[in-house]
Image: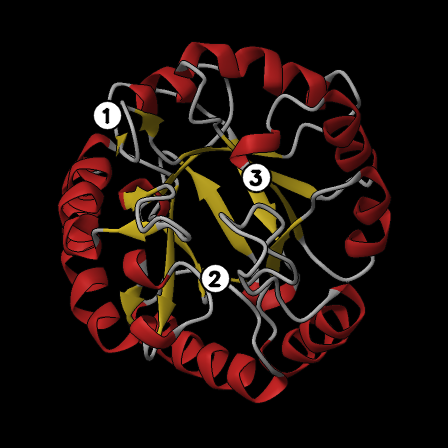
Amino acid sequence: METNARVVVGEGAKQVAFSQRERLSLIAGPCQMESREHAFMMAGKLAELCKSLDIGLVYKSSFDKANRTSLSGKRGIGLDTAMEIFADLKKEFGFPVLTDVHTEEQCAVVAETVDILQIPAFLSRQTDLLVAAAKTGRTINVKKGQFLAPWDMKNVLAKFTESGNPNILLCERGASFGYNTLVSDMRSLPIMASLGAPVVFDATHSVQQPGGQGGSTGGQREFVETLSRAAVAVGIAGLFVETHEEPDNAPSDGPNMVHLKDMPRLLEKLLAFDAVAKG
């Protein structure tokens, strides 16, 4: 997977680089931002872990889950409250932060605080949203739509770069396969890297079962390690993992989130694969 693409986010000693040629970086955090206390607890644990493993950390959490399966699904803490918490997290820990945007109007507001704007997979073809995100100048992590082939991402990437923003990460999160099922095609990783952007593998959304519980999305977290090992062995710039101390009681994406207590073992294994892949 030969590409010289490199994207750097954050400031000072806590800068995080994404490159197919360098040690992988981690994007991690709970699916939803639940409260200030929970965010600080999760951020502290992840910051300590990544420091011990000497890998870059981008802290991730969503202020609004706009694509819930049903109206009864918990949406999140809200934009204004989340931006205050993200600002305080950055001040306390120094790491870059990432969150999703869903509308054009949110882009400029979120970009005042957040280092990486994330485009959800379902919105990866929404031109006006992509252009608005690009014009903020912030790094963008764009999820490949479950309905797109990896080579289709060249057009998505072009919407950003032709809008003046070269700081783009392309993220694989599985492709729709029949009903309530996703599959991860590892060929997509080198294909997307050949387009000229660092590639991130989203291990936890790749094991989702969309709508698989009737009124909510299911998942198979037992396969996160399997898919992560395959992706890291192929060679990736970054790994995206949602994690929670009690995933079965989380307000969203519990079935596919990794237990926080399992993160050290998982990352130690994956870093060994990463060293071989890039050695």
Alpha carbon distance from label 2 to label 1: 24 Å
Q: Position of residue 121 (x, y in %)?
A: 52, 34
As helix, strand or loop, the secondary structure at mark 3 comes to: loop
**Given the image, on which type of amino acid does mark 2 rest?**
Cys
**Given the image, on which type of amino acid does mark 1 rest?**
Met
**Given the image, on which type of amino acid does mark 3 rest?**
Pro
Alpha carbon distance from label 1 to label 3: 20 Å
Q: Position of residue 173 (x, y in %)?
A: 38, 36
Q: Is residue 87 above or below residue 67?
A: below
Q: Nearer the viewer, mark 2 or mark 1?
A: 2
Most foreground residue, 50 or 77: 77
Please identify the quadrant where the C terminus is shown: top left
**Residue at 49%, 47% in the rendered image:** 69
Query: 10 Å neighbourhood of mark 1: few (<14), some, or many (≥20)?
Result: some
**Residue at 14%, 58% in the rendered image:** 269
N-terminal of the pair, mark 2 or mark 1, is: 2
Residue where numbered disc 1 is placed: 186
Q: Quadrant of residue 55?
A: bottom left
Is residue 31 toward the left or the right of residue 235 in the image? right
**Residue at 16%, 44% in the rendered image:** 229
Query: Could you tell me if residue 242 is visible in this image?
Result: yes
Most foreground residue, 190 or 202: 202
How are the colours assigned in the image?
Answer: secondary structure
Q: Position of residue 210 (x, y in %)?
A: 37, 41
Most foreground residue, 111 or 2: 111
Q: Is residue 103 above or below residue 115?
A: above
What number is the disc on residue 120?
3
Residue where numbered disc 2 is placed: 31
Q: Is residue 159 above or below residue 259?
A: above
Is residue 184 toward the left or the right of residue 217 in the image? left
As helix, strand or loop, the secondary structure at mark 1 comes to: loop
